[in-house]
Image (spheres, rainbow, N blue to C red):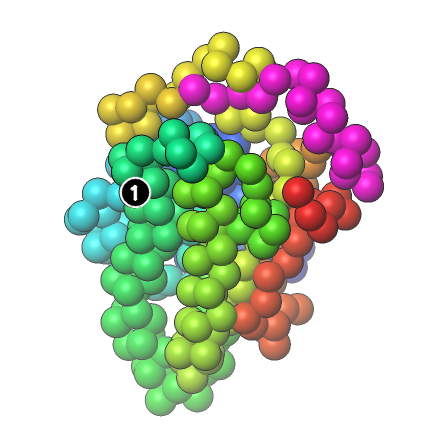
Amino acid sequence: MNRKLEGKVALVTGSGRGIGRAIALKLASEGAKLVINDLDEAPALETVQAIRDAGGEAVACAGSVTAPDFAERFIGTAMQAFNSIDIIINNAGYTWDSVIQKMTDEQWYAILDCHLTAPFRILRAAQPAIRNLSKTELEAGVRNVRKVVNISSVAGLFGNAGQTNYSTAKAGIVGMTQTLAKEWGRMNVTVNCVAFGLISTRLTAGAAGSSTANIDGREIKVGVNPDLLEAMERTIPLGRAGTPEEAANAVYLLCIPESDYVSGQTLLCSGGLTGV
């Protein structure tokens, strides 16, 4: 069977659970070798084991993407384990919502650090390795198109009440995508973005505030009020939230050879929703 990503090395942040896990499993099913990251080691290792059980190759690099040393460790793990980098997916993230007059500096910087500074650091750390790999391939007459897919949101494109921090960060990642598409094209790297709408994950399941997620030592309330969730789904032309697997498929489209001449673009994966 001819798998589209055979032998490629893919790094996916936040891939122990939810959308990130679905992305990792999808890429692995098409032959990619994975570097799995999660804030916690246990879910990262679970995803690694799932890939290995299916006959694939994967290693873990657990820890917070906001840690100052994470980017170098993440890139180093890929180079040490597989001696290459072909695909980078900046997926890790969460929300910490409040209207602007109640939003603290801590909330603001925490979300920007996760959704914007962390991808910046990862891509900055990756550049020397990608430059050297690209130069070696060029000298050998080998053409290998590498892929970066950053994750944005409809909130980053259209705004969303109560999410000044998140919307700003997700708008920023679009600008970063467009800039790096211009900087990295000479290295045969496409840089694109997927903007998700409402996707069913642990962060949206359940009533708002009924459960929390521990993120960098903070207990962040997660979940959406069921009535609000139902109202949100009614605004989606397809009439429902997306699944993690559907979200992963959108990312996959920008990783395969068929998208080798697509760069600097933002793909909406929102069930037809074009505003919030």
Q: Is residue 224 magenta?
A: yes
* Magenta stretch bounds: 221-240
Residue 212 in percent (x, y) is at 41, 17
The quarter holding residue 15 reads: top left
Q: Is residue 246 visible?
A: yes
Residue 103 in percent (x, y) is at 37, 33
Residue beneath the point at 63% across and 69% down: 259
- Amino acid type at mark 1: Tyr
Residue 9 in percent (x, y) is at 42, 57
Q: Is residue 250 magenta?
A: no
User: Mark 1: few, some, or many residues within 10 Å (few <14, many ≥20)?
Assistant: some
The quarter holding residue 257 reads: bottom right
Question: Is 86 or 54 nearer to us in this picture?
Answer: 86
Residue where numbered disc 1 is placed: 109
Give left or right: position of 169 versus 107: right
Q: Is residue 125 above or below residue 245?
A: below
